Structures are given as C-alpha cells and as structure tokens.
Image: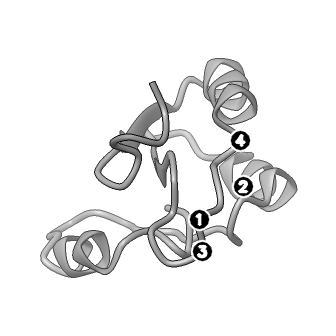
Amino acid sequence: VDELIHASVHDGLRTLRGGNVCFFRHNDLWDLNQKLRGLSHPVVIAVESVYSMTGDEAPLASVLDLCRETGALLVVDEAHAVGIRG
C-alpha cells in the first residue's frame, strides 16, 4: 500500500484480521519492488491515481507492469481523479 494513500484506506486496513499490510514509500517503484520480492502469498497493491493531499499521480503503467511480473493484483482509488483524468 502506498504510504500516502487516503486516510480512509488506512482506517479500513486497521480492521483486517489475519492479513499482513506492508506500506511502500510514496510512488517509489524500487521500494515497492523490493517489498514484493520473495512473497509467495497473494498480494494486492493499492494506490491512488491522483493523491488528494499532494496532487501527485501514481505511475500506473509502471505499477501495472510490476503487477504482471509478480502476479500481484492492483487496486486503484479513483475518488480524487474525477475531472482530472479521463
């Protein structure tokens, strides 16, 4: 999970039972890649397309490539992209 994902996602993750949550540095593909290596269980990567507090955009194409390489699933929060992205 990107460390700057919306607070509501952080709140939801705190309610998980039996799941492991790992945060990676904001938009840092190297850090994400390092944390994905060696994982054998199903992995879900969560990012925002546009981050509400900073206005940064996630490098979605690169994250998707990494998902394909590792078999991870990708969840993209689009809540703050309305009117900004098509």
The percent position of residue 46, horizontal first and vertical second, equals 44, 51
Q: Amino acid at mark 2?
A: Leu
Neighbour tally class for label 1: few under 14, some 14-19, many 20 plus, Cα within 10 Å: few
Q: How many marks?
A: 4
In the picture of the structure, the residue carrying the numbered disc 2 is: 32
Q: Which of the two discs, 2 and 1, sits closer to the camera?
A: 1
Q: Amino acid at mark 3?
A: Thr
Neighbour tally class for label 2: few under 14, some 14-19, many 20 plus, Cα within 10 Å: many
Residue furthest right in the image: 30
Q: Are marks 2 and 3 in contact (CB under 8 Å)?
A: no
Q: Which of the two discs, 2 and 3, sits closer to the camera?
A: 3
The percent position of residue 11, horizontal first and vertical second, equals 21, 81
Could you say which disc has been placed on residue 55 in the image? Answer: 1
- Taking depth in this image into account, of 73 and 37 the one nearest to the observer is 73
The Cα atoms of the two marked residues, 3 and 1, are separated by 4 Å
In the picture of the structure, the residue carrying the numbered disc 4 is: 59
Neighbour tally class for label 3: few under 14, some 14-19, many 20 plus, Cα within 10 Å: few
Element class at badge 3: loop
In the picture of the structure, the residue carrying the numbered disc 3 is: 54
Could you say which disc has been placed on residue 67 in the image? Answer: none
Mark 2 or mark 4, earlier in chain: 2
Q: Give above or below for 73 relative to 5.
A: above
Element class at badge 2: helix
